[in-house]
Amino acid sequence: MSALIETQNLYFQYLHHQTKQKWILNGIDLSIHQGEFVAILGPNGCGKSTLAKHLNGLLLPSDGSVQIQGMDTADHQKLDAIRQTVGMVFQNPDNQLISTLVEEDVAFAPENLGMKPSEIQRRVDWALDAVDMLDYKRHSPFKLSGGQKQRIAIAGILAMRPQCIVMDEATSMLDPKGRADVMRIVKRLNHELGITILLITHHMDEAAEASRVLLMNQGKVVMDDRPEHVFYQIDLLKQLKLDVPQVVALVLRLRQQGIRLPDPIIHVEQCIDALTAVREEDYGTY
Amino acid sequence: MALIELKNINYCYSPGTAFEKHALRDVSMAVDAGESVGLIGHTGSGKSTLIRHFNGLLRPNSGQVVYQGNDLWKKPNEIRSIRFQIGLVFQYPEAQIFEDTVGKDIAYGPRNMGIGQEEMNARIRESLQCVGLDNSYLERNPFRLSGGEMRRVAIAGVLAMRPKVLILDEPAAGLDPEGRHALFDALRHYRRKSGAAVVLVSHSMEDIADFVDRVVVLDQGSVALDGPVASIFAQAEKLVSIGLDIPQSTKVLLGLKAKGYSVKTEAYTVEQAEQELLRFLKEADRP
């Protein structure tokens, strides 16, 4: 079976860069399969957002190709189908909401796809329910909190029944509660509905929720592995000027002091359990 | 005497209408020259409303704003000149960049102060250097810079007015770790050089722990806590109960405490947590 998203030898540069020739994407070969939860990490300017914009044809490759369920993004005829397959949520929720009522906003895509009113209504209710915002159906989106707005933006994409949602730093403008709410919804969409998630983020604790982490630098994917492996590549993370998650730093320090902590530990809960186990084990020896 | 002091501020949005919202209730806080203060609180706690009182963008329903011993609202027509001394950097300040070169954009504030060309050129270069950008940026188009660079250009525009009080609302939001470090280095540099007071509004406890001396916690429009960083983080459970995030290291200690172990939970850096955990694990060796 072919992958949901497949990039082959993908190169990209902006045409107005006449002064210096610089590849923003510098040869990316990537396969992402249905149902995966992939986080993309990397410093500003490494090409994360540029890559994301290639995944539903907002940008087209300068060289190489991007295939979405076998459809080439360069094929103009396929763009509508591609954009129904891969939806994008951007950083600033205020730039994505257009209507004065939440339900109208969510209905925007199905309306433009020419669906019957009864089907539109069904999809809007279903999508709002999936993001826990059904109670706000008749509210104005502009009076909601940032986290609520992003959940409405997600619902607007869900109403198209996409295979994949790309979140481009969609939590970076939110407060801790808003972030936690959006992450809870994203995990649920992945686990319960099998929607493929691509999460671009600077927050290591969000990337820890993914099943696969891509590290990008200078237009290339420099590491592609499970988060518990990526997070312990301390030298590489530091070289890319990324933060080492506090839990990982703590585990490494304790190990240096001779505390035997098991692999893998990337979450706070895992760390608590491991520490409890070590302490109980020591008690047991007396 | 404090450089700037808010005394018993009350503020209400849309009073007398169905949308009436009491945003600040009897808020008092003072900031000394050279001090750095963190202002934290969850969304809707009144942080943004409060900082708009510092330079007279909002007028309190009751209470006083006292700057250098003078009540700001005694002489409302002098507030404009005071705004040059109390710089307010809003969230996403790069959205306010409008000129076509970096140099012109930074010059906008000082020009409005009536500063002469020679002095202005000196100030532009000084503030550009302060945010860690060199003179080659002066003629560049700010809209072609990276997000982190644009953020620093926008902040340089405020620094060029040489404010005595600098208030920043989430200045590091959306920046990558490198951009964040560069920004905080710039702010530290400015504070040391000018002796200005800095008020930092942030959701990031790591940034707060890293940058400020004292923390004021707002909850539902009132001051919930006010004290040195360590004493605020020592009340991690209270911070969690008012909906604030705490560092992962502190979460690990709180998790162990919740399981019934006796651990101290005031650590907020990895080093402090390590010490406490080593003590906790070694304690088990004793029968």
Image (cartoon, coloured by chain):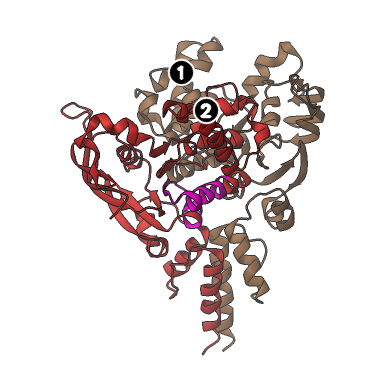
Chain rendered red: B
Query: Is residue A19 among what the camera can see?
Result: yes
> Dot 1: what SS?
loop
- Asked if A273 appears above or below B100 in the picture, the reply is below
**Image: magenta residue range:** B183-210
Q: Is residue A189 magenta?
A: no
Decide if residue B180 is on the left or right side of residue B2: right
The numbered disc on residue B220 is: none
Q: Are marks 2 and 1 in contact (CB under 8 Å)?
A: no
**Residue A14: image x %, image y %?**
74, 22
The numbered disc on residue A98 is: 1
Query: Which residue lies under the disc numbered 2?
Result: B117
Chain rendered brown: A
Chain for disc number 2: B
Q: Quadrant of residue A61?
A: top right
- Asked if B120 appears above or below A227 in the picture, the reply is above
**Residue A81: image x %, image y %?**
67, 17
Q: CA distance from mark 2 to mark 1?
A: 45 Å
Q: Quadrant of residue A80?
A: top right
Q: Quadrant of residue A146?
A: top left
Decide if residue B274 is on the left or right side of residue B230: right
Mark 2 nearby-residue class (10 Å; few <14, some 14–19, many ≥20)? few
